[in-house]
Amino acid sequence: MSNTNIPAVPLTLEGAAVLHQLFRIEWSKWNALEAGKKQSILDEAKQFFVRLEGANSGLFSILGHKGDLMLVHFRSGFPEISEVELAVSKLELNQYLVQTTSYVSVVELGLYESTQKIYGALMEKGVIPNTPEWATGVQEMLAHQRTAMAPRLFPDVPARKYICFYPMDRRRGEQNNWYMESLPDRARLMHEHGMVGRRYADVVKQIISGSIGFDDWEWGVTLFADDPLVFKKLIYEMRFDEVSAVYAEFGVFYFGMRHSAAELEKLF
């Protein structure tokens, strides 16, 4: 595919809308409440979180100083994300929480290898890039993949004990700029990068979400596992991969443990 008119942008498939919410508990205000008032607030919150669990949300306690609680929501679209965000804000418990940060994204599957195959097939048919016929051909070829990958595009919050979340960018430096590399080179690098992740597939559930245009970074990475040490091992090994070593920039890392609605009282 040497034709310079071929789009440089890899194809992607998008699925569930995602919202991460980080909260700090205002302990001085909470501890000043009478026991009966605390119980009333927690009873309402527990009933609410039971419903959230059934609607594909997860509650996590955060280790370290960056926050106390994290809520992770997967929904079919952004209107549903807006509804759950508003519902959380209306809880009486929310009067004793301060939201320290949040992250908005959408589950994304990058299709570097498929992109080259699809573009190549269209070129062989004589379809001119960036024409309506090209766009139609791309969507027709993606339709089957979108159906086949539906479980990955619309995942459940994994029932794992630990979570690790961090945002990241691809570097745009003067010497190493991911977006100036050719599509074949980026596809090769991403294939090698993906092979590292596949070695951990049995012990880590990884969900990549795209956030370009939605939040401050380009992607969000959410990892779920029952053994927290695999986060360290996976991310450390990936540091030696060329994609991470040369082109990756990482944001703040958040690490926590999952809790059911029934455990809310213990957290407070």
Image (cartoon, rainbow, N blue to C red):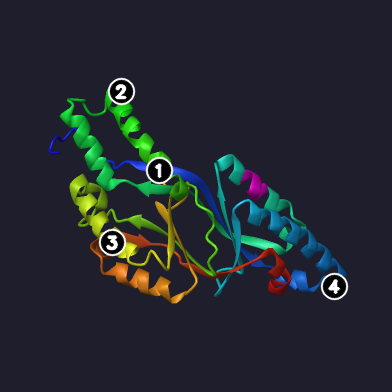
Foreground tag (2 vs 3): 3
Foreground tag (2 vs 4): 2
Does residue 202 show up?
Answer: yes
Q: Residue at x 87, y 69 (%)?
A: 36
Q: CA distance from mark 1 to mark 3?
A: 21 Å
Picture disc at residue 20:
none
The quarter holding residue 250 reads bottom left
In the rendered image, which residue does mark 2 sit on?
132
Q: CA distance from mark 1 to mark 4?
A: 52 Å
Q: Earlier in the sequence, mark 4 or mark 3?
A: 4
Q: Earlier in the sequence, mark 2 or mark 3?
A: 2
Crowding at dot 1, Cα within 10 Å, few <14 / some 14-19 / many 20+, comes out as few
Q: x%, y% of residue 235? A: 36, 69
Q: x%, y% of residue 23? A: 62, 63
Crowding at dot 4, Cα within 10 Å, few <14 / some 14-19 / many 20+, comes out as few
Q: How many marks?
A: 4
Q: Residue at x 47, y 74 (%)?
A: 228
Picture disc at residue 195:
3
